[in-house]
Image (cartoon, helix red, strand yellow):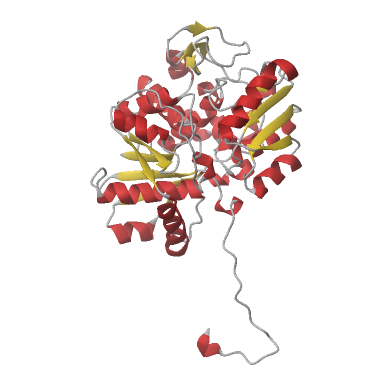
Amino acid sequence: MSFDENLTQARPTFVTHLECGLTGKIYPPDQVHNLSDAGRPLLVKYDLEGIQTAVTKTDLARRPGGLWKYREFLPVRRVENVVSLGEVETPLVRLNALENRLGASRVLVKDEGRLPTGSFKARGVVMAVSMAKELGIHRVAMPTNGNAGAALAAYASRAGIRSTIFCPADTPEVNVSEIELQGATIYRVNGLIDDCGKIVGEGKSKTGWFDVSTLKEPYRIEGKKTMGLELAEQLGWEVPDVIFYPTGGGTGLIGMWKAFAELLAIGWIGPKLPRMVAVQASGCAPMVKAWEEGVEHAPRWENAHTLASGIRVPQAVGDFLILRAVRESQGFAIAVDDQAITNALNRTAVEDGFLLCPEGAATVAAYERSLADGRVKKTDRVVLFNCASGLKYPLPQVTRRLDRHSSIDYAAL
C-alpha cells in the first residue's frame, strides 16, 4: 500500500458523540463546537467495539507509516477532507551516551521534529484543519508561542482556509517568519500566549473566525493522540514504563492518555500503562504547583518566564485533564530551571549528537533529576518527547576562523 492510499482510501468511521471533559454532558458530532457549556474541553468519543471489529493490528502493520494510518481511531469521516503535508512516523532514538553516563537501561527520544513544519504541533493542527474543512469553516485563528502557528499557517493554506495568528512579541523570529511565509497573517502582541488567546476569543464575534486555540476545539487532542497510538505500535503494542512530556497546554499528554485508554479498552495493550510525567519550567510551572497541592485546577502563573517558550503557558484550559492523567497513571509533575535545560541541551548535542529543542531538553533534565531523587529507576524503559527540531531555535554563534593565506599551526588545532 502506498502512502497516498492512507489519504485517499475510504475507511469506516466510529465517532459517536462529543463529551464535556469536566461534566460529562453529551454533544452531537458533525457540528461546529468550541468549548462545552461549562467552558471546558470537549472530548471525542468512539464506538470502540466497532473499531475493534473493523481493524486489526495486522491491518495497521500493512499500511505505510504516518498518523493517517490510524484513520479508524480518528474523527475525519470523508476522505476528501483529509489534509496532509506528508506526515511520517517519527523515530525512537536511543540516547546511548546518556544511558552509559547514568547507568540507565533504556532511554528513547521520540523525535517529533521530523514532522512537517518541524514540530509535534503538526499532529494536532492537521486534525483540527481537516475537521474545519469537513465542517465548512473558512477562517481560523489561534494564539501561539511559535510552532503551533507555523503548523496552522501551513495546513490552513493547504486546505484553502484563511488563518490569522497572534504571538507574544518575543516569539523567535524564525517562527514569525515561517508563519507569515506559509500564508497566515501574524501579529506580535505585547503579552504572553494567554493574552494572545484573549484577542482570539474576543475577535470571534467580530470577525467570524473559528478559534483553534489549544483545547478550545475538540480535534487537536485527536491528532496528538496519534503519538500514543504510534508509540505503542513501535514498541510491539507494549508501552514504556515512564513517559516524560513537555507540558504547556498539555494537549499531547491528554491525547496520549486517551489513546492508551482506547487501546486498553479494545484489548490491544494492557493492563500495564505508562506513568505520565508532566515536565514544566520552574519559571512557569502551574501544573507542578497544582499537582503538589493536590488540587484539580491550576491558577494563572504570574510573571511566567523560561527560554523554553513552548511550555510558557501561564494557564491551561485543560488543567484538570492533565492532572487527572498524571494522577491516574501514578506519574508526577516536575519543574526544571533554565540552566538545567541549557545544560541538558548542550550535553545531549555533544555526547549523543542529538540536537534537542529547549522543551525536549527539559525532559532530559527532568529525567536526570527524577533518576537522582528516586522517582524513576535505572531499569525503567523511558520515553522522552522532543517536540520540535532544534534547528528552529537560536543556536550559539561560532567566531573561530582560519586565514588560509597565513601559516596554519596544525598542532594547535
- Horizontal placement of 148 versus 222: left or right? right
Relative to 389, say whether 31 is above or below.
above
Tell me where residue 130 sits by quadrant. top right
The x and y percentages for residue 104 are: 29, 53
Residue at figure coordinates x 48%, y 12% from the top left:
19
Most foreground residue, 401 or 66: 401
Count of numbered circles in the view: 0
Seen from the viewer's position, the closer of residues 307 and 218 is 307
Q: Quadrant of residue 388?
A: top right
Work out which residue is located at the far bottom of the displayed protein and give it.
Answer: 407
Q: Nearer the viewer, residue 300 or 308?
A: 300
Res 2 seen here: no
Q: Is residue 192 above or below residue 114?
A: above
x and y percentages locating residue 331 in the rendered image: 31, 34
For the point 58% across and 52% down, the residue is 393
Q: Residue at left 43%, top 14%?
A: 22
Q: Is residue 259 above or below residue 44?
A: below
Res 370 visible: yes
Q: Quadrant of the N terminus?
A: top right
Q: Residue at x 36, y 35 (%)?
A: 288
Q: Percent position (x, y) of residue 372?
A: 26, 51
